[in-house]
Amino acid sequence: MKGGAFDLAGLLHPPTLALSEHSTERMSFMKLSKATLILSALLVLTSIILFIVPGPKLSIDFTGGTLMEITIPEEKEKADLELAVRSFATTPSIDYVTINRTKAGSYILRMRDLSNEEHLALQTHIAKEVGEMQEMQFTTIGPTVGATLKKRSVWALGIAAIAIVFYLAFAFRKVPRHLSPWKFGMVAVIALIHDVTITTGIFVVISHLTAFEFDTLFITALMTIIGYSVNDTIIIFDRIRDNLFLQEKREPFEQTVEQSLRQSLMRTANTSFSTIIMLSALFILGAESIRWFVLTLIMGIVIGTYSSIFLAAPLLVYWRSKRS
């Protein structure tokens, strides 16, 4: 019996060890990255196509025009308001106007830019046609200002990307000689371009299904996402650098990156999750005017966390392996 018990224990332990090794192998970030890199490439390509066709719906911030938010009597409908606006006699006429109802029950009107005289006349005309009206918001931007804002938004994103490359190259200048600090900067920028492109692609679809329009607040959200994404990536890259210096023997670079990802995973996930909890509360309880901004941040943080783990670090490994 004693010998049998010993043999039984001996038979039970090896399979347990084999299962543990098999589980570790299946959880390898590098192995998963082969599929996630393909997924990321497909999502980026799809987002670029969506940006071209059908393209984003731009707000008056970029196209120029007038935005009015008003309330009308409850018995009146959207069709009544549309008829009142289109019957407004002015030169030039208001041929193109979009009217959307908000969750609060007000209506948002977007049309060509109006002068102050036209604005006052339109208010009087709507009140005459549909009854008592209250204006909640009025904004008008000329086409020249809109074009300038569009150009400056593109410049802001481009300058931020270039600055990040130089900053990371400087921050990681003391990595071991067999690694170039410029690779860290370039990979981080590829990751943030991935995040911004996919987020933009998602909101192109949303803009054609809802009242959302691309405005300067959306660009602000993208800039925030860039900062958050780079922060996540830097945390992982910093762990990789530390492990390169601390390792007692010359381990394969892929193994060092795998170890660094495992060490950084919980910190990155906890930070992102706690941020999303706060943003979710703000999305549910916050003002209507910032909900699209908050939703952009939520999606960007999710995509940015994903790219830091499954895109940035694996790209660093593949780039180095091709040069080896």
Image: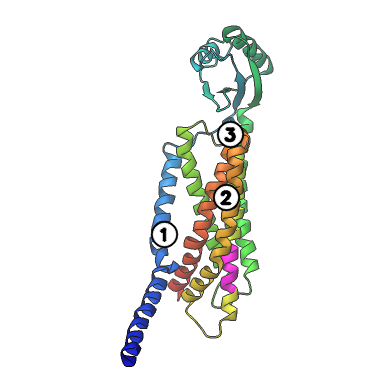
Which mark is nearer the camera, 2 or 3? 2
Mark toward the start of the polypeptide (1 vs 3): 1
Residue farthest along the top direction in this orientation: 128
Residue farthest along the front direction in this orientation: 1
Q: Residues within 10 Å of mark 2 (few under 14, many from 20)?
A: some
Secondary structure category for the residue under label 3 = helix
Image x and y of residue 169, in percent: 61, 66
Which mark is nearer the camera, 1 or 2? 2
Residue farthest along the bottom direction in this orientation: 3
Label 1 and label 2: CA atoms lie apart by 22 Å
Q: Is residue 118 above or below residue 179?
A: above
Three-letter code, disc 2: Ile
Mark toward the start of the polypeptide (1 vs 2): 1
Front-most of residues 238 and 88: 238
Where is mark 2, residue-wise? 276
Where is mark 1, residue-wise? 36
Label 2 and label 3: CA atoms lie apart by 29 Å
Label 1 and label 3: CA atoms lie apart by 35 Å
Image x and y of residue 70, in percent: 61, 20
In this image, 175 relative to 82: left or right? Answer: right
Q: Residues within 10 Å of mark 3 (few under 14, many from 20)?
A: many
Q: Which residues are magenta?
A: 234-241
Image point (55%, 58%), residue name: 189
Q: Is residue 289 above or below residue 31?
A: above
Secondary structure category for the residue under label 1 = helix
**Which dot marks residue 62?**
3
Secondary structure category for the residue under label 2 = helix
Q: Quadrant of residue 114?
A: top right
